Amino acid sequence: MLTITQALHDQLVAHARKDHPDEACGVIAGPAGSDRPERFIPMLNAARSPTFYEFDSGDLLKLYREMDDRDEEPVVVYHSHTATEAYPSRTDISYANEPGAHYVLVSTADEDEAGPFQFRSFRIVDGEVTEEDVRVVQAY
């Protein structure tokens, strides 16, 4: 189960809506080994695409160095789908290389009235996708 604060949930959704119609992407880091998302880190979608996201390799390297210096890890890796449901695509699954992370997908298809708003979390390990419950809390 992903437990996330209302403030982080709202920041993630706001980022997804702001970048619409392009896919938004980012990370929420937390203390290593805690499984507790704490630090919201919106990233630039280097692909600038409504159907694909890509972290800039330089930004990603900088982020991982920073997390390492702060004894953090990526607890949540997120992105948005702009015209489809919030479910990992084959490409999303192939790029999922953090077995301990929660992969959050937000569908902003409702912005174009193409579908309902969705905020969903998945575990993706060795190509296997498992949806998990999301619990939004005021504070940890």
Image (tube, rainbow, N blue to C red):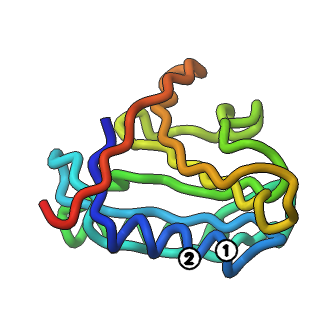
- Of residues 36 and 91, the one nearer the viewer is 36
Q: Which residue is mark 2?
A: 14
Check the image and report above or below for 25 versus 36: below
Res. 131 mark: none
Picture quarter with the C terminus: bottom left
Residue type at numbered disc 1: Arg
The reply to whether the C-beta atoms of the residues labelled 1 and 2 are less than 8 Å apart is yes
Residue type at numbered disc 2: Ala
Q: Secondary structure at mark 2?
A: helix
Image coords of residue 30 (percent x, y): 25, 60
Check the image and report above or below for 109 versus 17: above
Residue at horizontal 72%, vertical 51%?
Answer: 116
- Of residues 123 and 119, the one nearer the viewer is 119
Alpha carbon distance from label 1 to label 2: 5 Å
Image coords of residue 122 (percent x, y): 49, 35
Residue at horizontal 36%, vertical 69%?
Answer: 8
- Of residues 88 and 4, the one nearer the viewer is 4
Q: Which residue is mark 1?
A: 17
